[in-house]
Image (tube, helix red, strand yellow):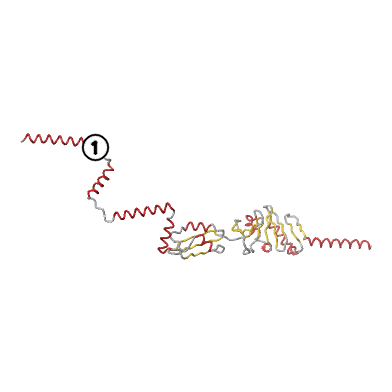
């Protein structure tokens, strides 16, 4: 009995030794892969429960992901989003524009790109704002979505200060000299006219320089910039006033005194030169020159005749 037991134990020890040798020679999976293998074995043996309809849901998710990827590659994501949200009741039906006097609402609607089915959700408000901000009269603009179906566009427009003539072109300018837009009609005919190179940037100084002489300014039809240094004033009666480069206030004071004392600007003159502080030059009109010459000739004849008689 004892001998049999010992013999069996020896055989058992021999078999264990063979199994260990086999394991040492076998391929061992890396640790991260062991869990995957165990899960696959469990899945194949039925020990893992899979919820019902998991395959259907997975297939639909795969198709949806494939569809979105295709739309992204083809550039149709925005179109699909717009169509979907429009059908859901977010199609833009009302656009409220405020603050626009010179800017046409039609221009704004065209830049928004509304076609009756445009979705409020899919509309890029920032891109719309940038487009509207490029319109000539627009200084500031806000574009706001009002759900579910409206857009608010609030404008702040530029203020036209004067008309600037450069060559044969006429443009509306702000007080700082920046150009707003070309002059297209007589709507702004009452604005002062500035003519010449650099006249648009120098226009801002006119208000200050003529602050004490509103009567003179009210008769100025055009401010003409000469050599980028001084102004010639073209009055509404055709008289030209040549101002100095400096001390404009003193020159206008002299002009106003002569007008008050002698009605200088009501006379038949073409120009008054005030560029020198100590003197004034007056240029007559051609008709006045002829009349003056005729009067001088008549006076000369009269003096000669009087001398002969004596």
The one nearer the camera, 253 or 241, is 241
Residue 1 located left or right of residue 298? left
Q: Position of residue 100 (x, y in %)?
A: 54, 63
89 left or right of 219 in image: left
Please state which of residues 181 and 178 is positioned toward the viewer in this rendering: 181
Q: Position of residue 33 (x, y in %)?
A: 28, 43
Quadrant assignment, res 239:
bottom right
Q: Could you tell me residue 294's position as x and y percent?
A: 84, 62
- The quarter of the image holding the C terminus is bottom right
Q: What residue appears at the point 24 percent right and 37 percent down from the top-left corner?
A: 26
Q: How many marks?
A: 1
Classify 125 as above or below 47: below
Packing grade of label 1 (10 A; few <14, some 14-19, many >=20) is few
Image quadrant in which you'd find residue 238:
bottom right
Mark 1 lies on residue: 26
Figure quadrant of the N terminus = top left
Q: Residue 301: x and y, percent?
A: 89, 62
Element at label 1: loop
Which quadrant of the figure has residue 203? bottom right
């Amino acid at each position: 009995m004892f001998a049999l037991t010992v013999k069996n134990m020896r055989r058992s020890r021999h078999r264990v030794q063979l199994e260990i040798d086999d394991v040492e020679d076998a391929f061992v999976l890396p640790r991260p892969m062991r869990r995957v293998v165990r899960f696959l074995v469990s899945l194949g043996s039925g020990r893992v429960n899979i919820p019902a309809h998991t395959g259907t849901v997975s297939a639909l998710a795969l198709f949806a992901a494939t569809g979105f990827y295709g739309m992204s590659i083809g550039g149709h994501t925005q179109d699909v989003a717009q169509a979907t949200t429009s059908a859901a009741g977010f199609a833009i039906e009302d656009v409220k524009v405020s603050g626009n006097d010179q800017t046409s609402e039609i221009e704004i609607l065209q830049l928004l790109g509304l076609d009756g089915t445009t979705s409020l959700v899919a509309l890029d408000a920032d891109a719309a704002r940038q487009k509207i901000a490029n319109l000539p009269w627009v200084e500031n603009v806000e574009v706001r979505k009002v759900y579910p179906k409206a857009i608010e566009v609030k404008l702040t427009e530029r203020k036209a200060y004067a008309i600037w003539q450069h060559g044969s072109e006429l443009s509306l300018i702000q007080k700082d000299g920046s150009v707003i837009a070309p002059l297209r009609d007589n709507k702004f005919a009452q604005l002062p006219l500035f003519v010449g190179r650099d006249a648009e940037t120098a226009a801002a100084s006119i208000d200050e320089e003529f602050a004490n002489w509103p009567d003179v300014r009210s008769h100025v039809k055009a401010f003409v910039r000469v050599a980028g240094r001084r102004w010639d004033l073209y009055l509404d009666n055709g008289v030209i006033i040549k101002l100095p480069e400096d001390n404009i206030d003193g020159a206008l004071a002299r002009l106003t005194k002569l007008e008050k004392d002698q009605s200088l600007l009501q006379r038949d003159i073409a120009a008054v030169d005030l560029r020198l502080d100590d003197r004034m030059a007056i240029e007559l009109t051609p008709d006045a020159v002829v009349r003056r010459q005729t009067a001088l000739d008549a006076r000369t004849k009269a003096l000669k005749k009087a001398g002969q008689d004596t």
